[in-house]
Amino acid sequence: MKKKHAFIFVSVILSLILSLLTKFSYGQAPALGSTDSFALFTATGAFTLNGSNTVFGDVGTDNGAFTIAGSLTLSGTQHVQDTKSAAAATDVSTAYTFLSSLTCDSTLTTPLGNNRVLVPGVVYCITNATALNGNLILDGQNNPSSIFNININGTLSTDSSSTVTLINGASFCNVYWQVNGAVSLGGNSYFRGTVIANGAISLLNQAQLEGRALSIGGDITTNENNAVGCDIYGMPLPVQLTKFTAKAIDANVQLDWSTASEINNHYFTVQRSTDLISFQEVGNILGAVNSSAIRHYSFIDYNPYKVLSYYRLMQTDFNGQFTYSDIVKVNPTKIFGFSIFPNPIGALTTVLLEEGADGKINNGEFRLYNIFGEEIMNTSISEGITTFRTNHLVAGVYFYKIIIDNNMIQSGKMIAQ
């Protein structure tokens, strides 16, 4: 009998410990359903976009006008009174009810911020309207699954330039704000987390949002804002890459890419491969951190492979999360160097493929220009060695280009005496 009681006692203690550990580690996240892909959404209310806005994720309203008074760069889908918005209207109400039902573990005094640190697995409550001043720190305690719950029984406003800072692995996709009232994000403020509000949501001039702004009833208004949501797996959406190309120039490989917007972007890593399985790091380029403008990047691989090669970008955020770009390839004939001789120019000029005279070249051209940039010669190059007459050229300085498949891969200066 004593052993039985001892077993029951130990089992109860272990259950309590596991319960506490589970609560501490994971917290309580709502089921967002159809709203998980939205960055900005209201079940009932007008949606007005002022100024220039960039949004990663879906946007919409299920009952109200959708007005783009300024401009919208959208990496997602617009939903206005359609099947998706109808489902989202139901699901956002369910999520709000779930968060409202959570038992409060700790009551916070107002205002928030002033470098206050919150830990995961605790339901924080504020019993009245509050403001966020300065910096609020959310410490993930090195657990990427950490969940934060903050319930506010009243309106929420953030001061200009205020910040919600994530440290030690915390993810904005695991932060939930339940607000029984309107939400106003101050100008130039930096807010993180999913807000589910019972009221209007306003993003003031150049406020930035990482997460979601969802309302069960109230207008949504933006003004020169940048918002990035989460994907259906609860992960932050990546930097929007609009272009990524690779081409050979003068026996090197030049990579160019552009971004339409960047959120929390630390750096890009250029990687190359010959088999699409094993990739080698070539170099790093710092990102713009946060940007709502189009940005262009370039990187030159000065020691490329001499065979068919593949390149990709690995984009890494400041929190260590990373994503890969699509893969681009470089044709090996485009990274071969050419020798042009003699120089000064003689009666005959020869173009030699340095990697072997037996090579075949597709769509190759040798172009010669005078000092005014006028093209005076265009000769086809189709073999590893090509010779043509240049005895008609008058004395002077000329410039040549070798073009393969409409890409310039080598250029230089030549002299005729």
Image (cartoon, helix red, strand yellow):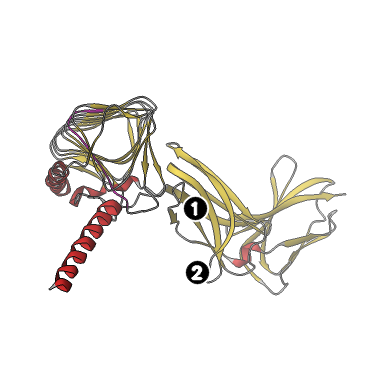
Task: List x then y, in percent, for residue 287.
Answer: 51, 44
Most foreground residue, 368 or 108: 108
Q: Of marks 1 and 2, which one's residue comes earlier in the chain?
A: 1
User: Residue at the spot x=13%, y=35% of the render?
Assistant: 44
Q: Looking at the image, which residue is at 62% across and 62% down? A: 334
Which residue is disc 1 drawn over? 244
- Kind of residue at badge 2: Leu
Residue 167 placement: quadrant: top left
Q: Does the image show residue 232?
A: no
| Disc number for residue 276 | 2
With 105 as the anchor, is 251 left or right in this view? right
Label 1 secondary element:
strand
Q: Tell me the quadrant of the picture where the N terminus can be found.
A: bottom left
Q: Give the range drawn in magenta.
A: 146-156
Whole-angstrom CA distance, mark 1 to mark 2, is 17 Å
Q: Is residue 210 left or right of residue 414?
A: left
Answer whether residue 153 is magenta in the image: yes
Q: Is residue 189 above or below residue 335?
A: above
On the picture, is 247 further left or further right than 400?
A: left
Is there a contact, CB below 8 Å, between mark 1 and mark 2?
Answer: no
Q: Nearer the viewer, residue 93 or 19?
A: 19
Q: Nearer the viewer, mark 1 or mark 2?
A: 2
